[in-house]
Image (cartoon, rainbow, N blue to C red):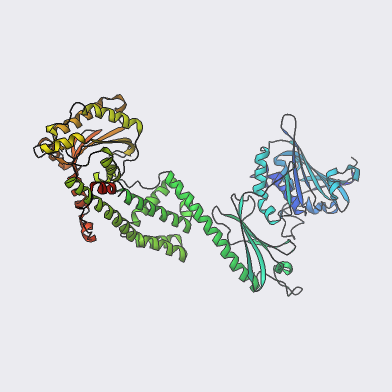
Amino acid sequence: MAKKNGFKGSAAIGNSGIKKHFGNDELWAPLFELAWNGFDAGASFVAVTVVENEIHGVERVVVLDDGEGIEFATLDHTFGNFNDSSKKANLSLKGQHGRGRLAFHKLCANASWFTRFKSVDAVIEIAEPTIKDFEAWLIEEADQKQEVLTHGHGTLVELTQFTDVLPTQDELREKFAVEFGWYLAVHKEKRLYLNGSAVDVPRHEAFVQAISADDEAFEAQVIRWEQRPTSEKSYLYLLNSSGELVYKVLSSLNQKPNFFTSVCVKSSWADTFSQEQDLFNPEAHTPTSPVWRKFKAQLDRLGQSVYDEFLRFQAEEVVQGYEDEGYFPTYAGLDEAEKAWRHQHTRDLVRNIYIAEPRVFQTASKKQAKLIIRLLDRLAVSNENEALCDVLEGALDLDANSVQDLANQLKNATFENIVASIEILQRRATAVEQLRHVMNVHYRKVLETPDLQKVIESNTWLFGPRYETLGAEEDTFTEIARKMRDEVMARNPVDMDDVDDEEDLPGAKRQTDLFLARKFPSLDSMGNRVFKCIVVEIKRPAISLNKKHLRQLEDYAEIIKRQPQFKSEKMHFELILLGRQISSSDTIITSRLNAHVLRNDPGLVTEDPRMKLYVMNWYTLLDGFELMHGFMLEKLKLKRDDYSAATREELVAELQTEH
């Protein structure tokens, strides 16, 4: 290829100075720069082709555009200027420093530009070792690349002698999509191709709204990106009726954490737009025009609504993540209803604070976030919840709406808690009265396991807060525990020793004992995670508990201790013997209960490091509930219903629902 009218030039900066400017750029950034140069030159499309050799290394990369081309006569002002550009005047241009073309040295040793500008064909070449120098010459049409000739104008850049590797095609496509997505969304007529396939606009949500200001119509579109565009902040783009960009300014949504947007506005009002008025164009529409100000106020409200919805969704995701990671308190010692209310209340509070100021949690470490959540939980239900609102308002610089939302939640916390507690107490007080009536009147008629079995499963709160819910059966554990229990019970059939009144014996023989066994993760007294194994033996109502039944419980405990599968230090047992009453002639159970009274653990008769035995009677449980909640029950003035007319079936059916 003959070099006609060739000349050499140099950028006004040294080789090392040029390379220093690209020190932090990624390896694929040079391809971005060349593609941007094509769009800056007015191209309707840019096509990037990566050509591999036989061993899948990069042999060459071709970047083709159908832009206006590079003017040969002004190369001193384009290739000769670094950090400057002849394309500054056009605000739609991405490249504004005239240096992107030299980024190629990050990837390869040589770059050649085949260009046609107004039917003038030329070639420019630059080598990496002397990157500040360029050589250019005119060429005949026969020497021009066919791809450039096909479009009549444009530029084809060819990169060769690669010194590094590119990402895979799929990875590279994703990076191009993130880099150029905003541009392709704003300029829907533009196309970008990678190895022959169009680069799609990245995943996003678009919110479109028609806005009117002083009878001028604007079509507004807020685009929220899932990933941050690599080279653009959140801008507002104003296009005229022909789709040409006439104004570009940072939007009100800029610098929102993890919230990436492009705002596109199209209107015929922009056909006479000018960034500022002057003597030659006194009627031009400008950013200070009343119409623009009125429109902008409505647009900002649209943008804020999009941001608010995004925050609500993101807050829910973040809070769920905290829950999955165990950041929220466990509320040990509280009953299930109180736990549920406290958990939901703290969850809502954390979500509202995140919505009001996401950076509180975004900048916090895991330990800090956990500490913040647990402090909020304690303060929100204390007498200082109003003070907490004042602290949050002052520290977070909240707007009026956010302050009101938090204030409403915190000030209503106590009231909501009381209401929830009242509802639970009312249901449970009713259950206590019904169960008392069953034990007083119908105890000889409660025959089959299904009667009381479901009653116990639905009202485990009677045993105390730690038995609020025993969960579902764990088949293996339940089967083994039941088999061992049956072994103990087979040695001692029901006889006169089991009852106080001889007339109770026939009923006792017809009834069956009940048995519940559950195994679930829990915490020991030191806060270590263990498996807690609960076994509840509910004696048939006609039986009176005495030393015989206590020995059965102790025999059962001994069998469990001997089983290899139950010898783990991580398995802790609680065996509970429950009956309608303790025999009036028994002294052993009463003595054992008195010996452990200082432990403040109702029903405790034996305590080993991994094994506790309890003996309880129904009336103690029922009276315990009323004593524990007596003050509240008195204040509520709950009406004690008369159940004398109720049948056993009706009472049992009612008790088998959860309270």
Does residue 349 appear left or right of residue 9 in this picture? left
Q: Is residue 387 visible?
A: no
Closer to us: 534 or 349: 534
| Residue name at image x 21 percent, y 27 percent | 490
Does residue 540 appear left or right of residue 54 in this picture? left
Point out residue 122 in the picture as x, y percentages from the top left corner.
86, 47
Q: Quadrant of the N terminus?
A: top right
| Residue name at image x 35 percent, y 53 percent | 341
Does residue 601 appear left or right of residue 242 in this picture? left
Work out whether 446 lies above or below 229: above
Looking at this view, name the residue that lies furthest to the left.
Answer: 585
Point out residue 478 in the picture as x, y percentages from the top left corner.
31, 32
Image mark count: 0
Which quarter of the picture shows residue 578? top left
Closer to us: 431 or 242: 431
Closer to us: 12 or 436: 436
Point out residue 333 in the picture as x, y percentages from the top left corner.
28, 46
Work out whether 164 lies above or below 636: above
Closer to us: 575 or 653: 653
Q: Is residue 517 visible?
A: yes
Point out residue 149 in the picture as x, y percentages from the top left corner.
86, 47
Work out whether 421 lies above or below 276: above
Which quarter of the picture shows residue 634? bottom left
